[in-house]
Image (spheres, rainbow, N blue to C red):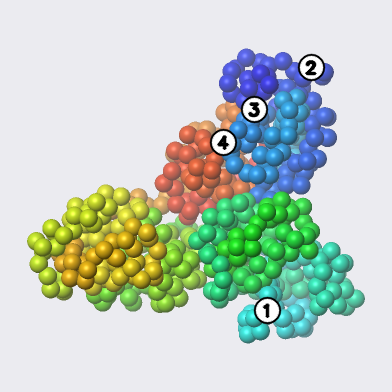
Amino acid sequence: MVALLLISGCDTTPPPSHPANPPVSGKARVGDPAAGKVLAERCATCHGLEGADARSGAPFIAGLEQAYLVRSLLAYQVGARQDLAMQAVASALNPLQLADITAWYATLETPWRGAVADDQSKAVLKDKQARAAARTLAVVCDSCHDRAQLYRQQQAIPTLAGMPLEYFVPSLKSYLNGKRHDPIMGQFHLSLSDRDIYNLGVWYAHQIPVKAPAPSQGNATAGKTAARHCAGCHGYDGNSLNPNVPNLAGQSADYLRKALTQYRDGQRNSPLMKGPVKNLSDTTIANLAAYYARQQPESPLHKTLNQPQAFNPLADGKRIASNCDSCHGADRSAVVPALTGLSVPYLVSATLAYQTGERQHTTMQQMVAYLSDTDIEKVAYHYALLPLTPTPPTSAGDTRTGEALSSGCTLCHGERGISPTPETTPSLAGQSAAYLISAVQAYGSGKRVNEAMAKVAAETDTSTLQQIAHYFAAQAPQQVKTWLPEEAEMIVEKRCSRCHGDGGISTTPGVPRLAGQSEPYIVVAMKQYQQGIRKDAEMEAMAYGLSLIEIKAIAAYYARQPSTVP
């Protein structure tokens, strides 16, 4: 164990080799790679025996420095990194086994594949011959899988639009060979050839996915918390970047509940799904289904081909916000809040609250239902950076009386309604009295969920509320300081390259190479540092304040860098 601690960064003294083996060459300084290869069978499901698979949200680990691999496994053992599967694997290794298994992976030179939505994956979108051949076959499939038919009949059937060929083909074959059981799907085992299956896969990969209607069951807010454990495979918001893993975003909640229940109860078998779902309650499954069903689906194939390459989130935000300006623009009514000058984190959390049902407002829920998490961030930046447009006071009331009554509100919302913590608590200054009154009443009726505000609403009579609202409406608003989202190259140069090296080729002992790393893995890892799920003071500082827009841009940048092993 001392040797492992030494090579993981606690000392620079060269450690002794494995007692029963000669010193190891290459990147491994202790352990027996041959013995490690046998042990690595338990890692192969996710990382692959050659360390270059990225299933179940796992990173590429072939050729990583042994010091870093040791440090990572020790972090899972002591809880500094939290992942149930990895904690189980790491905790079962004794010091000699830890040395052997890291020696195996450190000495590998398996090339990393980098970005998974590569040219080969995207080529299916250009196969016009396959699409033409599948047109008639797809009519039969759409009798069940077409969205209009699906939701009219209220059947728990998945949408196939935008499904990558890599996932579609083995999934369909699993029904035809009996690995998945469905009486209707099983009938096609004699009528579909391998070529037919390929053609259908190309057809559906070409279709642009659309979002399901809002689910009738489940708590999407609780589901978002539970979904942290699914993000490694299925993406941070249910949009998988790995074509071998299905998108969950925008799928029917009924179908997601059915599929998760079948995996949990053993009616579907998958080594990757077995562990994560085995202890899920029916309530948690319903919550997960509600969360994913509310997310906007994004096909990485379509996104890569059709999305502008220029990084311009403010222009994107302005374009998306054009749908919001009809209500929130300069000519808004007195019952509509001003969004200008509010902080990005607060605008994001408020918008997500409408998506998840934590805030209930029919028009708002309809308007934001189809926005992705990054779309919401872009709109938030747009409004946060616009010049202030306060609403002129229109209510009757006495400002001095309102000020005297507002002391309870200023504890959180700040003197004169200028919040000291705008990221979590909004400023009230300059908002219309009519809007402030309606917002408090929404907390009182349960249309908005906040325990402290519900108590305020219950304890404040109408006359007092009107005077307080009039006071805050008369105050001058203040712009929240907002930093523009930066391009990945700028962030990498300022924050990442010092440790991870130019282009992500690390030359710092104990720091991993990021060039060519799996894109979804980088996104999830950085979010985990932000959320405190991974403990590392320096990485937490580097990830602090980064928007999801920036994190995804950084991940895409590194995934596309040449992954040559030094």
Q: CA distance from mark 2 to mark 3?
A: 18 Å
Q: Secondary structure at mark 3?
A: helix
**Cβ atoms at labels 4 and 1 below 8 Å apart:** no
| Crowd tier of the residue under label 3, counting other residues whose Cα lies within 10 Å: few below 14, some 14–19, many 20 or above | many
Q: CA distance from mark 1 to mark 2?
A: 62 Å
- Give how far across and how far down residue 110 sits, in percent: 75, 40
Q: Which label lies toward us, 1 or 2?
A: 1
Q: Which residue is mark 3?
A: 67
Q: Residue at x 30, y 70 (%)?
A: 441
- Give how far across and how far down residue 247 sits, in percent: 64, 63
Q: Residue at x 26, y 67 (%)?
A: 436
Q: Which residue is mark 4?
A: 80
Q: Secondary structure at mark 2?
A: loop
Mark on residue 155?
1
Q: Residue at x 9, y 61 (%)?
A: 400
Q: Which residue is mark 2?
A: 19
Q: Of label 4 and label 1, which has the lower sequence position?
A: 4
Q: Is residue 96 visible?
A: yes
Quadrant for the N terminus in the image: top right
| Crowd tier of the residue under label 2, counting other residues whose Cα lies within 10 Å: few below 14, some 14–19, many 20 or above | few
Q: CA distance from mark 4 to mark 3?
A: 16 Å
| Crowd tier of the residue under label 4, counting other residues whose Cα lies within 10 Å: few below 14, some 14–19, many 20 or above | some
